[in-house]
Image: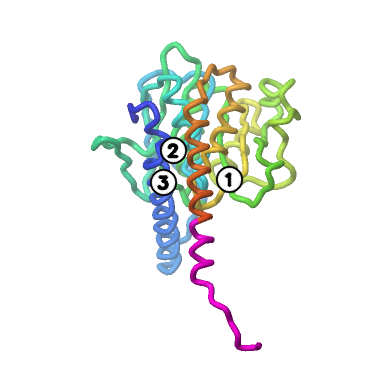
Amino acid sequence: MVSAPLAAVSPFDVRGCTLVLEHQIIRAERLIADRSQLGYVDRPVRRFDDVRCRSRIDAPETLLAGFSEFGLAGLTAVHYLVDQLDLEETGHITAENLPSIAPFSGGVSRHHTRLLSRSDLDLTVLMGELFVPLGATNPLASAIIDWTERNDVEEIGVLSGVPLAHSPDAQRTFYIATDDYRAKRLDGVDGDDTLQPMGNGYLSGVNGSFVTHGLDPSLAVCVFSTPVRARNPDVNAALRLLETVSEIYDFDLDTGPIEEFATSISEHYERLAEHVEDTQEERRYEDRMYM
């Protein structure tokens, strides 16, 4: 866990995570292509002999998760949540046959998928820094679900970003939730200016596994999703997710530092866009061929 107050959302860390994420995607795509050429067939078999889930304390009833996805909104949000709530690592989850990464900070390595909590707080945060290719999500999702069952976790909330072109009016948080989660957490919040139900569609990957499992009344599940920029770290999207979970779970978070960082990131990309436009103007020449 990073100890610096804003290390989880520092400019160097977020931009570096973007490069790592792109490398993981390329590597995962190559791995899947190589397996296909060699005749391997990936079957969604639920196995636990190649999965390890270790936790040093009994899990609270609520699990909030963020994974390495496009825009890094969910991952940035849970990083900030861990720092603000002063959570400590209490366990980790690993699965074989996934792309291998070893995150590190200050020369100290850590597990890519970690559980963090605090003894006096009824909350565990799952922070997943590994980009998991779609065809390999089943072992990881199965391990997490098995851990929730063994530790009597009652609900899962996932902070997630979806890469799509969007207008300023769409810069809000949407949800896809099971009926029991809506009854428990969203009564009185559903349909306000900042939180709306997602329209028609489907979920795949880890999020899809969680929601499908949540159709069983034993586990309440909600995926909080917001539009993100696909190829750049979207700190504003992370801020929207933080504001949503703060309202739902009554967290007392100081969002001032991440708001300032989001503003600086936006200004950085605005200056970059102006620079690119000026460069294109300088290189443009007058074509007189048809005059």
Q: Which residue is mark 2?
A: 128
Q: At which x and y percent is residue 176? A: 67, 36
Q: Quadrant of the N terminus?
A: top left
Residue 90, percent from left and from top: 37, 24
The disc placed on residue 228 is 1
| Range drawn in magenta | 275-291
Outermost residue toward the left in this view:
107
Mark 3 secondary-structure assignment: helix
- In the rendered structure, the answer to whether residue 61 lies left or right of residue 182 reads left
Of mark 2 and mark 3, the one earlier in the sequence is: 3
Q: Amino acid at mark 3?
A: Arg
Q: Please tell me whether residue 286 belongs to the stretch shown in magenta.
A: yes
Find out whether the residues at labels 3 and 1 contact each other: C-beta distance under 8 Å. Answer: no
- Quarter of the rendering containing residue 110: top left
Disc 2 secondary structure class: strand
In the figure, 124 relative to 100: above or below?
Answer: above
